[in-house]
Image (cartoon, rainbow, N blue to C red):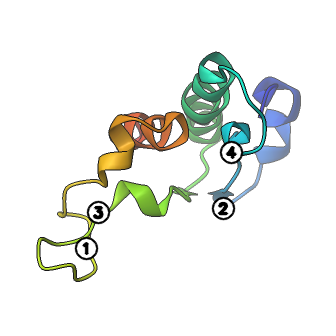
Amino acid sequence: MADVAGFADALEDVDVVFHAAAYFREYYAPGDHSRIIERINVDATMELARAAHSRRVAKMVDTSSSGIIGVELDGSPGNEQTPPSPLTETNLYFMSKRKVEPLLR
């Protein structure tokens, strides 16, 4: 995902792109990963979407994160209308997934 242009030509004659790549090293390595998380999870995801669109890929399925969909007030599972988990306000990975979701629409 760090070089979408390097593989974008492979999208020719593709019907559907399933995007499941992400950077989430903040769980495994200390330090500030905000720039690389933004670059991979937001900017590169959008580059991929634009590359797929320009090559007439019919559909792109983006695999997001469980943190994007919160739980209902009664603790039951949420859905796409349920407000996001509070983690999307503090966790860099969840923040990036929340940021890119409306951009993909």
The residue located at (19%, 56%) in the rendering is 83
**Quick one: SS at disc 1?**
loop
Calculate the distance from the C-alpha at mark 3 to the C-alpha at mark 2.
Answer: 31 Å
Q: Residue furthest bottom?
A: 76
Measured as percent of width and height from the top left, residue 35 is found at 63, 16
Residue, disc 4: 27
Residue, disc 3: 70
Foreground mark, 4 or 2, reads: 4
Whether residue 11 is situated above or below residue 6 in the rendered picture: below
Callout 1 amino acid:
Gly
Callout 4 amino acid:
Tyr
Placement of the C terminus among the 4 image quadrants: top left
Measured as percent of width and height from the top left, residue 68 is found at 37, 55
Residue, disc 1: 78
The residue located at (49%, 35%) in the rendering is 96
Q: Residue furthest front?
A: 30
Q: Quadrant of residue 56?
A: top right
Q: Pick whichever, 11 or 67, lies toward us.
A: 67
Calculate the distance from the C-alpha at mark 3 to the C-alpha at mark 1.
Answer: 6 Å
User: For mark 1, does the 10 Å Cα neighbourhood hold few (<14), some (14 to 19), or many (20 or more) residues?
Assistant: some
